[in-house]
Image: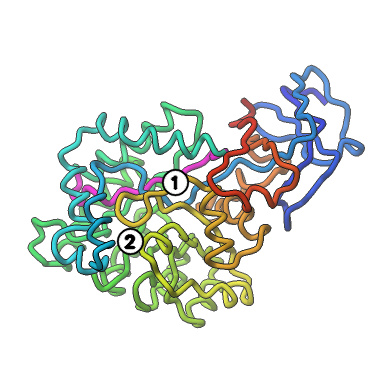
Amino acid sequence: MRVDAVWDNARLATLAGALGLVEDGVVAAKAGRIVYAGSKREAPAFDGARRVDCGGRWITPGFIDCHTHLVYGGDRAREFELRLDGATYEQIARAGGGIASTVEATRKASELDLIDQALPRLDALIAEGATTVEIKSGYGLSLEQERKQLRAAGALGGRRSVDIVTTFLGAHALPPEAKGDKDAYIALVCDAMIPAIAREHLADAVDAFCEGIAFLPDQVARVFEAAQRHGLRVKLHADQLSDLHGAALAARFGALSADHLEHTDEAGVVAMAKAGTAAVLLPGAFYFLRDTRPPPIEALRRHGVAIALATDSNPGTSPLTSLLLAMNMGATLFRLTVEECLAGVTRCAAQALGRQNDIGTLEAGKYCNLAIWNVERPAELVYRMGFNPLHARVWRGE
């Protein structure tokens, strides 16, 4: 078999069903896609290949951060101080802080400013083996400003060897010019923003924040209906601060994912399972906000819902740019297993983006996105804190 490159003398965690461990592993790629991943004893002969001796290291699929707000202006360190003094997330938001303060800073920034500010955050994820990163808008809250954010997000993929998945989050918060009229703003999102974003191919999906301090279920339903009219998949910030039955709403629209889920009830989990909607858990925000109510992990397991993990990288509630630390938090705060954590940033994260046919496992036909690690066992990737054992990263065979 003629291929472009072969990585051998490796141990594989293919994540193709459970961890998919292979002790005498080899991966071969052609034209940027895997043509073989498995045991060297069962591999065909490979011709014309660049060969890489992995020295017995472990190879996993390249990591996937399936929920970030990576592109924004400014920071919210002052609000962090306020929270340390006892202010709640809701109190800060209602006083004009929170998302509104990031909207102001993002609107003032140029598109190039946003790219320059986001690149170090993206580089931190890449340095830990990330090969795919989802980036949401939602800090512009006008058509012009949301376009700017999404263009900046897309431009990052031209600056680095990484796949960028963009999500339009116009229904994130109410802009000041809306003067408190949520229904009028939602009409603007549905009638002007979504059609333009879809026409210009600026986003792969549409998200919304379903919460009392953001938008109510009937308003989110209008956003989802508009998204579907324009051929865009949906996902949802659901049940983070209260149970508005956001998970069930997401499932009703066949959402790719419902994210956060700390207050989701059993009926919401059942609906997600029936719809094939992935759960995206965000332990960085849980930790940063000092939350005490974890997502319904046992119910998600019992009903077979795919569990993804992500950084939720954002300036206000999860200034986290480490999927390795997100996995450790998922294990320590949510009691996820090593297998669940690793699947959460590979196979299940791919499902949460609707990209499971192309990424997330080491299988023939998928992009050759690899992370090669200096570890003795995969559990070390979840166990260690503040330590990066990445040896090499491969994106589309390079």
Q: In the figure, is residue 348 to the left or right of 163?
A: right
What crowding class fits label 1: few (fewer than 14 Cα within 10 Å), some (14-19), or many (20 or more)? many
- Residue 95 location, quadrant: bottom left
The x, y position of residue 266, in whole percent, is: 51, 82
Residue at 72% in and 22% down:
4
Q: Look at the image and tell me in which quarter the C terminus lies.
A: top right
Question: Would you name the residue on which mark 2 appears?
Answer: 208
Query: Is 130 colored magenta in this rendering?
Result: yes
Element under label 2? Answer: strand
Q: Specify the segment rendered in magenta.
A: 129-143
- Look at 73% across and 54% down and name the residue there: 19
Going by the numbered disc 1, the residue's amino acid type is: Glu
Q: Secondary structure at mark 1?
A: strand
Mark 1 or mark 2: whose residue is earlier in sequence: 1
Query: Which dot marks residue 134?
Result: 1
Q: Point out residue 247 in the picture as x, y percentages from the top left corner.
A: 44, 72
What residue is at 67 percent from the left and 47 percent from the top? 361
Can residue 214 be seen here? no
Q: Quadrant of the N terminus?
A: top right
As rendered, which of 25 and 167 lies closer to the eye? 25
The x, y position of residue 42, in whole percent, is: 90, 39
In this orientation, does residue 170 appear?
yes
